[in-house]
Image (cartoon, helix red, strand yellow):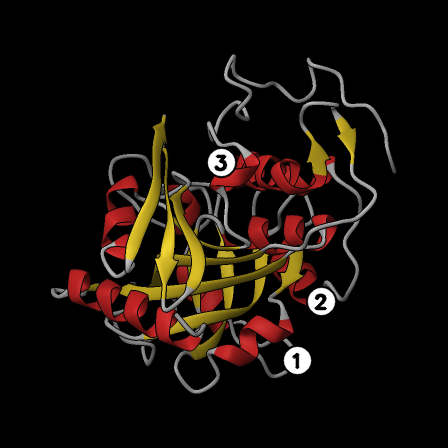
Amino acid sequence: MENRHIPESELILNPDGSIYHLHLKPEHLASFVFTVGDPDRVPLVSQYFDQIDFKIKKREFVTHTGWKNGKRLTVMSTGMSTDNIEILLTELDALVNIDLEQRRVKTEKTRLQIVRLGTSGSLQEDLHAGELLVSEIAIGLDTMMAFYPHLSGDHDMADAIQRELELSFLPYQAYADPELLGKVEGQFAKGITLTCPGFYAPQGRHVLLKPRMERMLERLAELNIGGHRLTNFEMETAAYYALGELFGHQMLSLNAIVANRPLKKFDREAEKTVDTMIRTALESFGF
């Protein structure tokens, strides 16, 4: 892999030399990155910066880079779902670990710290809307990682979910970075997160089209896997953890619980909950 040449067709650059989807150059990116799904949430984070040096927008990817308490940091939006996370992490890694002018892999690797600030729904009655949760483990219900090398570590939870839902594919199981996880110890409840490939039927919602899987929420909530239970679900975390492991970056996913699905309740102060998550994260990581 060292010094391998990357063809133009495999890593596309814009005419100004920035990377294709994110529209960033290496100097635009800090080594610590907060990510959010919603582009409108980027300024909700950067409002707490002491100064903002750079702003760019392309498609759903909005980036602000600046300083807080003498430390440089970036916040950027990703849009929803794991396919966007694959684009995000591949291009972020390229920005720091590929010489874009020479199109060659650098011999010395740079390790990014990337923390997701997201919203999520609870699978358990006692995990209430308005609470904050950090994903210690994530299980992906999408098939993206079938196209990448196998992950290290156990997949006992993925096995149990496959059996329970009678899935034709094996979900993937990935883990938070221990160092980053330790930074939020005591500030966020720990949980095991399901990452779903959609918002409606893949999360057990019945609007007009009835989900194929009967009682999906109840069955998942009742699972006991080695004394552990599934706590929440969303649409990105497992891809962060899985690709982060393969690329060698440090990943963490923080969740504002804005809905309790078993109780059918939504957080009426969701914006305040998200702001609390943002401020708590900034403080926890020393910003």
Q: Residue at x 53, y 32 (%)?
A: 25
Badge 1 vs badge 3, beta-carbon distance below 8 Å: no
The answer to whether residue 252 is left or right of residue 242 is left
Q: Where's residue 245, x and y in %? A: 70, 55
Please give the residue where the numbered disc 1 appears in the rendered image. Answer: 226
Of labels 2 and 3, the one closer to you: 3
Please state the horizontal and vertical placement of residue 57, each as a whole percent of the image: 34, 30
Instruction: Name the disc covering residue 84, or none.
Output: 3
Give me the disc on residue 156.
Answer: 2
The Cα–Cα distance between marks 1 and 2, rounded to whole angstroms, is 9 Å
Examine the image and state in which quarter residue 6 appears. Answer: top right
Whichever of labels 1 and 3 marks the residue nearer the N terminus, that label is: 3
Quadrant containing the C terminus is bottom left
* Amino acid type at image mark 2: Asp
Instruction: Tell me which amino acid carries mark 1.
Output: Gly
Q: Label 1, label 3: how many angstroms apart (C-alpha)?
A: 32 Å
Name of the residue lying farthest toward the left: 268
Q: Secondary structure at mark 2?
A: helix
